[in-house]
Amino acid sequence: MKKIFGLALMSVGLFLAACNSQQTSKEEVKKDSMAAMPTDSTKTVTYTTAMVDNKKDPTCGMPVTAGINDTAHYDNHAIGFCSKECKDEFLKNPKAGLAAAELK
């Protein structure tokens, strides 16, 4: 009887240890995935011409190859702008501005 009780107790102990180690494993994975996320909110995104569908800033006409500082999505297109001010102006009347964007 003592052997059966001892085996049962050992089985429960192993089961709990396995469950506990699996829980720790999930927590470690969560910590690792969180570590991969950027935490510095002051970092800026660098946009490239491959990320946008236009050749020129639709507001001022500047070529996007000179630099893209902001983007907007309109009518299934990613549009690049040289500045936030140009983007804001575009968003006042995006349909008219889209024609000036010279889409690729």
Image (spheres, grey):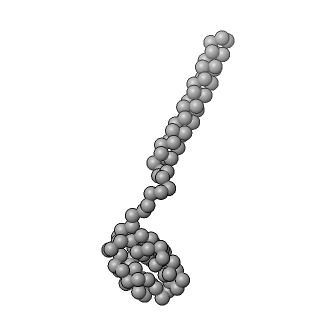
Q: In which quarter of the image is residue 50?
A: bottom left
Residue 76 appears in the picture as rendered: no
Q: Which residue shows up at 66% across the image and 11% down it? A: 2
Q: Is residue 48 above or below residue 87?
A: above
Q: In this view, does 28 lie above or below 80?
A: above
Q: Which residue shows up at 47% across the image and 45% down it? A: 35
Q: Where is residue 93 in the image (x, y as percent from the top left)?
A: 52, 85
Q: Where is residue 18 in the image (x, y as percent from the top left)?
A: 56, 30
Figure disc tally: 0
Q: Which residue shows up at 49% across the image and 81% down it? A: 90
Residue 86 appears in the picture as rendered: yes
4 with respect to 87 (left or right): right
- Considering depth in this image, is 21 or 53 the residue closer to the camera? 53
Q: Quadrant of the C terminus?
A: bottom left
Q: Which residue shows up at 43% across the image and 87% down it? A: 99
- Considering depth in this image, is 15 or 21 the residue closer to the camera? 21
- Considering depth in this image, is 81 or 76 the residue closer to the camera? 81
Q: In which quarter of the image is the N terminus?
A: top right
In the image, farthest residue toward the top: 2
Q: Quadrant of residue 54?
A: bottom left
18 with respect to 77 (left or right): right
Q: Where is residue 40 in the image (x, y as percent from the top left)?
A: 48, 52
Q: Is residue 19 above or below residue 62?
A: above
- Considering depth in this image, is 66 or 77 the residue closer to the camera? 66
78 with respect to 18 (left or right): left
Q: In which quarter of the image is residue 53?
A: bottom left
